[in-house]
Amino acid sequence: MSDISKKIDDAEMSEVVGGISKDKALSIALSHANLPKDKVWVKKNKIDIDDGIKVFEIEFHANNKEYEYDIDASTGEIRSFDIDSIYD
């Protein structure tokens, strides 16, 4: 397995993420989706390497929709997002 595709566990996160925290990444995604934290069910919030860039992969459900975000772990920039119905 290459370093680029290697998953990084939470114990390593503090060593590799020099920018934002896991909670801050979630806050950025929720703000973009215009949803309060207490109204969503967070399915995934983990760090990964995507095209050589450390990102937080975030998935959550609210209002019968599934939200997926990739947030740059260094800058907090939203690299990609997708919103789908949970019924699709």
Image (cartoon, rainbow, N blue to C red):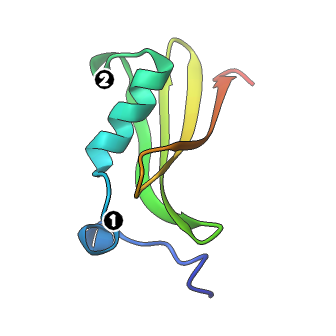
Q: Which residue is mark 2?
A: 37
Horizontal arrangement in the rendering, residue 54 relative to residue 28 (left or right): right
**CB contact under 8 Å: marks 2 and 1:** no
46 versus 84 height, above or below: below
Please name whichever residue, 75 or 48, is drawn nearer the observer in this view of the structure.
75
Q: Amino acid at mark 1?
A: Val
Residue name at image x 51 percent, y 11 percent: 63
Q: Which residue is mark 1?
A: 17
- Quick one: SS at disc 2? helix
Q: Position of residue 65 (x, y in %)?
A: 59, 20
Camera-side residue of 51 and 37: 51
Kind of element beneath mark 1: loop
Outermost residue, right side: 88
Q: Which mark is residue 29?
A: none
Tell me residue 75's x, y (percent).
Answer: 42, 51
Task: Choose the circle earlier in sequence order: 2 or 1.
Answer: 1
Quadrant of residue 10 in the image? Answer: bottom left
Give how far across and how far down residue 6 sits, in percent: 53, 78
| Three-letter code, disc 2 | Lys
Mark 1: few, some, or many residues within 10 Å (few <14, many ≥20)? some
Residue at (75%, 25%) from the top-left corner?
88
Q: Residue furthest front?
A: 75
Nearest the viewer among 68 and 76 is 76
